[in-house]
Amino acid sequence: MIEQRRVALSTGIVMNVATAGPADAPPVIFVHGFPESHRTWRDLVPLLDDKLRLIMPDLRGFGATDKPQDVADYSTEILVADLFALADAMNIDRFALVGHDWGGAIAWAAAIGGNSRIERLAIINSPHPAIFQRSLIDHSEQRAASQYMNAFRTPGMEQGIARMGLDTFFDKSFTKHVDLASIPAEERASYIADWGQPGALTAMLNWYRASRIAVPAPGEQVAMPDWVDHVPRIHVPVRVIWGLDDAALLPVQLEGIGEVGDDVSVFPLADVGHFAPWQAPDQVAADLRPFLMPA
């Protein structure tokens, strides 16, 4: 059973948090991506909640969580601070962290920061920041696949989405990744209801606008940012689960992934796309379960 409650955080927002599993089981914080909510994990819950305490927030700007409207409220530092503030509010000391898409980006950042409260890190189709930035400059296909990020950063993009209609935006968001007919009607309705809340589109798009990842235009010549060569190594165990048919994040994101930490394992999923947590929940759970519950 999934329970939900709103939790006030020391970072100044109230976060909607879904939980499942025994209260005294090892805690795992699951962080979703764009344009989703805690419902990203809906099909994984019954596969993992017997032995783990699953904490699944709607991240800042998404779902039923508060939606600050300033771009500055979505800096990486603030988004990472939300994770630890959530752990504080839930009286959790140390925890495992699982992230997908933008949630994975924040999970990577939290682990790179070296906070000893993170025991292990699992990533599902979310690129390591240095590998991603290099690929956006050196790999023309990845650069082309990521031009949507610049579109989302465009001032007034939310008004454009509102004009096209949220149903059309839903189709555009998912049609390249999944068979739209495979998404239940109630899930589609949940997405659209979330996006239709006041300020929701601006809040969601601000994740892109606040990111320091540079996405050059096709053919543009740019220098590699200095920070790319100075990302700290991760010292906790890392498991990367990757749907190889991801149309937005190409397999180039796995090149060099074993060098970003001391203990990195990669579990590729054939014939699975970007939304692996609900496209292939059995496979994802089978790869997560032994990692999150080590002997």
Image (tube, rainbow, N blue to C red):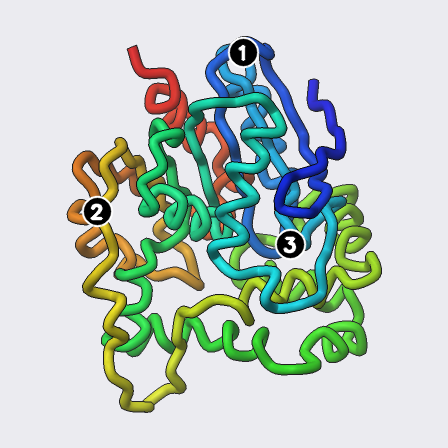
Quarter of image, res 53: top right
Disc on the earlier residue, 3 or 2: 3
Find residue 219 and name its label: none
Find residue 50 and name its label: 1
- For label 1, the SS is loop
* Residue drawn at (53%, 68%) of the image: 210
Identify which residue, 251 or 131, lies in the foreground: 131
Residue linked to disc 2:
233
- For label 3, the SS is helix
Identify which residue, 39 or 189, lies in the foreground: 39
- Mark 1 or 2: in front is 2
Residue linked to disc 3:
180
- Mark 3 or 1: in front is 1
- Provide residue 265's location: percent of width, then percent of height: 23, 36
- For label 2, the SS is loop
Residue 90 vs 194, above or below: the answer is: above
Task: Calculate the distance from the C-alpha at mark 1 to the C-alpha at mark 2.
Answer: 33 Å
Identify which residue, 171 or 86, lies in the foreground: 86
- Provide residue 206's location: percent of width, then percent of height: 61, 66
Q: In this rendering, would 39 be left or right of 5?
A: left
* Residue drawn at (23%, 76%) of the image: 138
